[in-house]
Image (tube, rainbow, N blue to C red):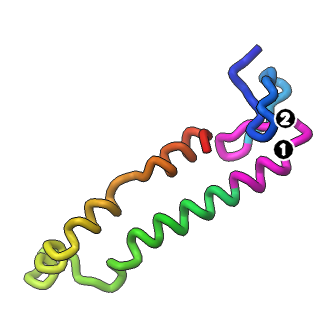
Amino acid sequence: MSNYKCRKCNAKLRANEAYEYRGAFACEKHFDEVIEMRDFERNQIIKEEHNKTKVFKGLDLTDSTIGKANKALLKPRIEIASKESSRLKNYERGDL
């Protein structure tokens, strides 16, 4: 037995029975559903990451006087946006 487990039904799978999509494993029966789940999760994370950074669009964040002032004002948001979310880490590990 391997460490493969269907993301939908939690069935333990041998390597030759496991189907993989974007880091998530599935049995043959649930492969299409797991694809849909992973695509949904991926799209949600993309939206979340976009929302963290959209406030910076078009702003001067260079080392100019205005850019430095913007960076100082937005420091907490820049810090949050620069960190990888736990949801993204879990997705990349296939844990969601």
* Residue 27 numbered tag: 2
Q: Tell me the residue at 83%/24% (across/down).
A: 16
Q: Residue at image x 34%, y 63%? A: 81
Residue drawn 80% across the image and 21% down it: 14
User: Percent from the top left, x then y, of residue 35?
Assistant: 77, 51
Which residue has dot 1 on it? Answer: 31
The spot of residue 26 in percent (x, y) is 79, 37
Task: Write down the quadrant of residue 17 in the picture.
Answer: top right
**Mark 1, residues whose alpha carbon is within 10 Å: few (<14), some, or many (≥20)?**
many
Please tell me how crowded label 2 is: few (under 14), some (14-19), or many (20+) other residues with Cα within 10 Å: many
Q: Amino acid at mark 1?
A: Phe
> Distance between the Cα atoms at labels 1 and 2?
6 Å
Q: Is residue 32 magenta?
A: yes
Contact flag, marks 1 and 2 (Cβ < 8 Å): yes
Q: Quadrant of the N terminus?
A: top right
Relative to the observer, which residue lies in front, 76 or 19? 76
Amino acid type shown at disc 2: Cys
The region drawn magenta spans 21-38
Residue extending furthest toward the front: 9
Compared with 86, 4 (above or below) is above
Q: Is residue 22 magenta?
A: yes
